[in-house]
Amino acid sequence: MENIGMINRGRVTALFGAGLLLLSLVGVPARAGAAPVSSTAPASLEAPARTAPLAPEAAPAVRPAGEALDTCGGPVAFGRVLLCPTISGTEQHLYTITTTRDDDTLDFAFIGEFGLRAELRGANGTCDPLDTDTCRTGAAGVYTLTVSLHPASEPGPYSLSVESRRAPSACTPLPAEAFAFPGPGSPATMPVGTAAVCYTFDQPAGAVLHVTDPAGGQVRGEIVDGTDTRLCHVPSAVVSSAPCVLSRPGPYRILLRPYNPGEHAYALWLPRISQPSGCAVLPVAPFGDPGDATAAGSVRLDHLGCHRLTGLEAGRVGVRISHNSRARYALYDDAGLQVCAGLPASAAESFVCTVPRTGDYSLVVARWTTGGGAEPVDPVIDYRVAVVPLNRSTGCTATGTAWDTPTLRIHQASTVQSTCHTFSADAGDVVGRYTEAIGSGFVMSWFLNADGTPFCVSSGPETATRCVVPASGTFRFVSYVSNSPSAPTTADYAAQLRRFNSPVGCPVVSPGAFNAGPAGPLGTTRCRLLDIPTAGRYRIDAVGPDNTVWWAGVYRLDGASLSDCGVVCTIPAPGRYLLFVDVDGTGRSVVDENDAFATILVRDGPAGCAAVSDSGLRDATRTVGFATGRLECLLLPSPAGATIIQQVPLDPAIFPTTTVFDAQGTYLCGNWELRLVGCVLRGTGPFYAVIVPPAGVASGSFVTGFARTDGPSSCPTLTRTAGRGLFATGADRFVGCYVVPSDQHSGAQTITVRRVRGASTMTVSVYGADGSRYCGYGNIGKEATLTCSVPAGGRALVLVEAEAVTGSFEVTYRDPRN
């Protein structure tokens, strides 16, 4: 004998009375002097990975049916289950197994006690069938199988079964329905204790089969050709693996073995992918509502649905499989070669399939799994599928790319509907595509050229992809809603196509001014043409009726965007530019006749700003009026290096955004610095503040003022001997200010504020001569005292802010060190 090899580590099951329990075994080392035994299983016999493994099978509840032995030992016939009533102590049961073919492989099944051990011996080696379930023999002849117990093991019964792979005891012919759609194949039951079963079949050489899992991972095997050469695993390694190609002549055999020696119900189904039988005919569908040109089915794990496309023309087709079905597809020609495959179409790669030649094809549908192990409770899924030729325009309707073209309102009547709109464009045109689902799901869309090749594919939900058209001609815009598994079968969505270069249908807007209404009134078209008289910096924005800022962009008329456009847009040269709204104030990407926005177009800079005092503590404050699209600009008289604050009532009904800039438009500070720490005017003047109304406010007013906190002050003084002051508040006065001269404090100040009349709350802040805020106290009700440390040698400025209501307040100062 050449060598006996071990294949596939196996199991043994213990038999106790009428019940069977699954137990592990301890292998027996090779005897001294025995020929080497291969410990590596050939790749063809490795156990296949399971797509969805079941829980371990419960131990069989009955004894295996077989031939009860009076004397345990003797010849073993292939395919029989032998029952030995008992083995105990040091007994050795000797069996003989005769092989008739060289280089055979024997499958074993044992059911017995925990301590059972076995050894198969030939002329040149040994094999432990309990360790492997399988032994590979050498030359044809007689082999000896010795069954014994490990020392101290309990006595008990066992069963034994052996089958030959090259010369099996019997092979059952598979019927034609085992290779046809829609299944379920040829059912059978593998008896308890069986080592293996054999089936034979004949199919044309070169046929392509899909090998399904016969019993949910409980049995496995292989397909061999007429020379006993393995062709394929049973089942395939994973559901999505390549089909089985019968690449060599038959007749063919399937050798099926259990993972566990219990009873297993199974069904052999090997549907033929090449020239399949039993597939329902699927007609090609038009664009739009596919009507009856769809097919539906149900699939479970490792099961397939099949649909036949006869006379399918060469070219590109779109395959739509309902996204809420968790199904995937593959298209095969009659030779069984896969043409394309995809998931529920959420990308061009899954939607578009190139048919290489006119002919008959099979669309095979399988359940889609993520591979993560988390699967729905219901293992059966329903699906619907449609195939649309992409080189045709059947079912398409025309649309335009002008900005005032009516919005496309699309009803998707089927989960597999693909909607098409044709449009004309010239080479180099920049065409934007806006889509938005109404309700659940998201819109996928493509542009197609004349032969159905996609270009400018949308990259995700709710996109506004801008695309450079590669050539002149008529193109198609294809779209659909891709729903989640829980979404309804119908859907509605909106879409727009808009040309960015040489735009048509946009209202024209000229620059406006600060402290006035918007340059462009409210309008619904999502674009504006901006007539810019001179190059420079401009504030450009689109705002809704309530001053919510919409996401907008500025383009040249050749379709190129302006890169230097943020809060302020730098226009490089006089001329006409395109302003378009990308997303409205609520996040919608389709801006239509139900949406209106105003256009802000103002030359940025201090010119045209209203002069305001920086002594608002002494002078009257300014009332700022708000309206849709109105920006307030105030010219600040303070010199470079000064520190200013903004005065705001403690209870404003409207709180806008204030931003300070230097003469070149450089940002200096915003609300935080102006209200809490002071804004230092760096750079060159004149300086100006732009006040923007808050989102959600269509109109109203706001009282404010500015004051320097550094340098000399005209506020009343507080001294050690005259440290009491009184001030009144009202609608336009809400701040009291006092100065403690440098010679009237020692570096520490104790300030008490008290409300004399009214119900306003207060805050108190103390600033040094450098304009910095050294301390403060907020949300004061009736009265509060704070001690602050402003450095000696400079004056201290005390500010008390209140609400813009009628009231009066008392401020008292004392030097805690004098």
Image: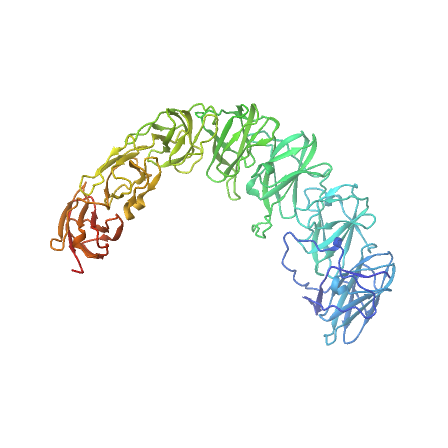
Image coloring type: rainbow
Q: Is residue 325 left or right of residue 191?
A: left
Tell me the residue at 23%/42% (across/down).
707
From the viewer's perspective, is residue 450 above or below residue 256? Answer: above
Q: Is residue 379 left or right of residue 211?
A: left
Location of the C terminus by quadrant is bottom left
Could you say which quadrant of the image residue 381 lies in? top right
Tell me the residue at 65%/60% (across/down).
57
The residue lying furthest to the front in this view is: 793
The residue lying furthest to the left in this view is: 721
For the residue pair 307 and 501, the one nearer the viewer reads as 501
Location of the N terminus by quadrant is bottom right
From the viewer's perspective, is residue 134 above or below residue 389? Answer: below
For the residue pair 781 and 302, the one nearer the viewer reads as 781
Could you say which quadrant of the image residue 507 lies in? top left
For the residue pair 487 and 129, the one nearer the viewer reads as 129
Residue 596 seen in render: no
For the residue pair 670 and 131, the one nearer the viewer reads as 670
Residue 747 seen in render: yes
From the viewer's perspective, is residue 818 above or below residue 388? Answer: below
Q: Position of residue 45 (x, y in %)?
A: 75, 55
Q: Position of residue 741 (x, y in %)?
A: 17, 51
> For the image shown, how many numbered marks are present on the structure?
0
Q: Position of residue 447 (x, y in %)?
A: 55, 30
Could you say which quadrant of the image residue 621 lies in? top left
Q: Position of residue 660 (x, y in %)?
A: 31, 39
Q: Is residue 33 left or right of residue 552?
A: right
